Amino acid sequence: MSTHFDALETRSPAEREATQMAALPAQIRHAQQHSPALSRLLKDVQAERITSRQALAGVPVTRKHELLELQKAARPTDSFGGFATVVRGPQMPRIFASPGPIYEPDVATRDYWRIGRAMHAAGFRAGELVHNAFSYHMTPGAFMMESGAHAVGCSVFPAGTGQTEQQLAAIADLQPQSYSGTPSFLRILLEKATETGMAVPSLKKGLVSGEACPPSLREWFSSQGVEVYQSYATADLGLIAYETQAREGLVLDEGVIVEIVRPGTGDPVPDGEVGELVVTTLNPHYPLIRFGTGDLSAVLPGPCPTGRTNMRIKGWMGRADQTTKVKGMFVHPGQVADIARRFPEVLRARLVVSGEMANDQMTLKVEAHQAPQGLADRIGEAMREVTKLRGSVELLGPGSLPNDGRVIEDARSYK
């Protein structure tokens, strides 16, 4: 029984980086030539020059709200807003809808979303039965998990959601070894089994997604005899990262290039600093380039103890969209970054909005090296210019601000 899904997981970091960077120019060129939306978004990008992470950092970020806006503008002539490079028919057996709605294509390739890698890491093996409790209605989650289960040689019971007692009866009859679905529904199933005295001893492992699964909940599952692992995937990108038996963060999938950037910008942050996950997929059918997920995370140092050599992240740490309204005007993380970029002395900045309703106050807290006289005043002037609002500036030493990815903190009292 192989410990790893394939040889890609254990190649050297240098080999992986070289292979992925070598693939970038062709992927960007393909997107420019075959995706009308990306042709416009990447019109100033010279594909042949994007051969390093430094070069990739200069490519514009496309965020999810922009994808939604472009899709809406293109309907009904193009459901995908010009992002997909496949057409309806045999190549596209299904179309799915995510909240928005954002429409995503299914493509007729084996394990299109690459979930098999996460299932293998969670201990799913050929010949087993997976009880798949993601919804089979409109959204792709159930089909993502089903395709991954098939990739590792499992059979699938398409349970969907709801009808708890009927699901427990099916588990008792069919004796599945594995569960896929949300952690909250797995807990409902196990609690209902205890309440009704219906034992489900066959369930030994699970791959969960769609919700946070904190250590306390994972330990509760373990006390019930079920070892649960997390996967981080989206309908747009497929698998991004997955948990292993080491239980140390999430290992990145082999089919994506991940950067962590300062929220509201496309600027990569140093390893270990919390920022927004920006993903470039090597999927030619839906070739998203520097796609801003809106999720916060940070890089973990070192390789996974299981022998997987790809970068690890801490997992989901919140949302990056911290836009807030101050005195009736929206202030965006990108504006805070714009202010900070104007001053080479500034390392990091955090805008704190305080006060009570109708009495908003802004304080820009700034980490700075050797702040020259008058720096706070000049930053204050830039703040007024960029946001059209007045605020105070507080200069701090390096390392003073918390490493939590927050660029705008709403500390107002709403009583």
Image (cartoon, rainbow, N blue to C red):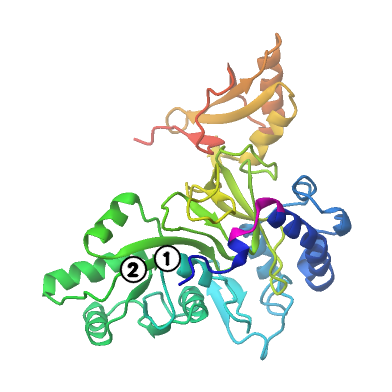
The residue positioned 65% from the left and 54% from the top of the image is: 12
Instruction: Examine the rendered structure and indicate whether residue 87 appears above or below residue 280.
Output: below
Q: Which of 236 and 173 is in front in this view?
A: 173
The image quadrant that residue 343 belongs to is top right
Disc 2/disc 1 C-alpha distance (Å):
7 Å
> In the image, which disc is placed on residue 122?
1
**Circle 2 crowding by C-alpha within 10 Å: few under 14, some 14–19, many from 20:** many
Residue 256 position, x and y percent, is: 64, 61
Asked if residue 236 shows in the view, the reply is no
Q: Name the residue under label 2.
A: 205
Give the magenta part as a residue range.
10-14
**Viewed as shown, does residue 228 lie left or right of 172?**
right
Provide the secondary structure element on which disc 2 rests: strand
Instruction: Examine the rendered structure and indicate whether residue 245 appears above or below residue 313.
Output: below
Q: In which quarter of the image is the N terminus?
A: bottom left
Provide the secondary structure element on which disc 1 rests: loop
Asked if residue 383 shows in the view, the reply is yes
Residue 15 position, x and y percent, is: 71, 56
The image quadrant that residue 171 belongs to is bottom left
**Viewed as shown, does residue 41 lie left or right of 282?**
right
Residue 140 position, x and y percent, is: 51, 75
Instruction: Examine the rendered structure and indicate whether residue 14 appears above or below residue 22.
Output: above
**Viewed as shown, does residue 115 lie left or right of 255?**
left
The residue positioned 66% from the left and 69% from the top of the image is: 72
The residue positioned 28% from the left and 54% from the top of the image is: 219
